[in-house]
Amino acid sequence: MGNPYDPYGQQPGYGQQQPGYGQQPPAQPGYGQQPPAQPGYGQQPGYGQQPPAQPGYGQQPPAQPGYGQQPPAQHGYGAPQAAPPAQGYQQEVHHHHYGSTGQLAEWGSRAGGYIIDYLIVVAPFFVLYLIGSLLSGSGSGGAAAIGVLFMLIGLAVWLGLFLWICHQEGTTGQSIGKRQMGIRLVGAQTGQPIGFGMAIVRKIAHFLDSALCYLGFLWPLWDDRKQTFADKVCNTIVVRA
């Protein structure tokens, strides 16, 4: 016959004590709850703590990154390499330079070269023409004919020297006067000699420089590209050789 106070009709096991008068029997785990896990053999966990995992034999535990630090990036296979630091922007300072043609020639050098070329062309012509004029004015027929011949020779020499100067400037960029002053005539866009034909056109365009009291010859003193009127018409510049 079962104990009427036992709800399950179970009797205490052999050797077990009945709870004393007024004591509650030990609480049984509720439905669906697991009993607390018991520590394994030889393990002594602290109260409320889990035992830390131990590293393998001879291994060091991995270092943990500090607060706010990113872990080091791993270079996987095929990962792009870091680009080298870009060089700072370097500014190039050009003083009185135009493009890649060189430094622009100063007005004094240009004036000196022009005077030398002018004397080379005009001096022989002036001497021959003066002799021809004196012979022509002597009154005799033979002397007058010789005088005219001298003047024609003077014109031929002038024309020959003029074309020779243009050829030198057009093919090499330097006449005798420019070579002596260390300057050179080139195209403003190409930086190369302008050619024989364009050199002749530029010489003729110097008549524009002679207008208005030779203002065109003085224009390079304040012009940014140091050009005369003839240079602007032919798009040329004079640079230091």
Image (cartoon, rainbow, N blue to C red):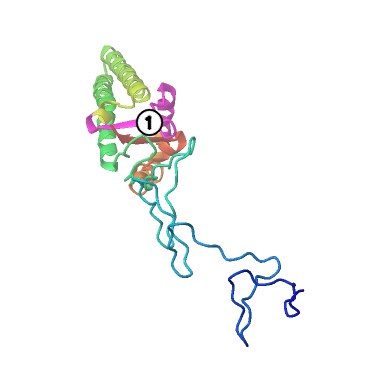
Is residue 183 visible in this depiction of the protein?
Answer: yes
Quarter the C terminus occupies: top left
Q: Residue at x 52, y 62 (%)?
A: 38
From this view, report whether residue 18 is shown above or below residue 39.
Answer: below
Decide: is 190 above or below 19.
Answer: above
Q: Nearer the viewer, residue 136 or 120?
A: 120
The number of callouts visible is 1
Which residue is situated farthest in the front direction here?
1
Which image quarter is the N terminus in? bottom right
Please report the residue visible at 37 percent of the width from the left and 48 percent of the height from the top.
88
- Residue at image position (24%, 21%) is 131
Looking at the rendering, the stretch of residues picked out in magenta corresponds to 180-205
Residue lying farthest to the top in this orientation: 142
- Dot 1 alpha-carbon crowd within 10 angstroms: few under 14, some 14 to 19, many 20 or more: many
Splitting the image into 4 quarters, where does residue 75 fall? top left
Residue 91 placed where, x, y %?
36, 47
Mark 1 lies on a secondary structure that is: strand
Residue 119 appears anywhere in the view: no
Q: Where is 129 relative to 101, above or below?
A: above
Does the segment drawn in magenta span residue 198? yes
Name the residue nearer the viewer: 158 or 148: 158
The image shows residue 232, relative to residue 48, as above or below, that is above
Q: Looking at the picture, how far across and down is residue 51, in whole percent?
A: 45, 60
Q: Is residue 71 magenta?
A: no
Q: Residue at x 61, y 76 (%)?
A: 26
- Please give the residue where the numbered disc 1 appears in the rendered image: 186
Which amino acid does the dot numbered 1 rest on? Val
Q: In the displayed image of the protein, which residue is found farthest to the bottom? A: 22
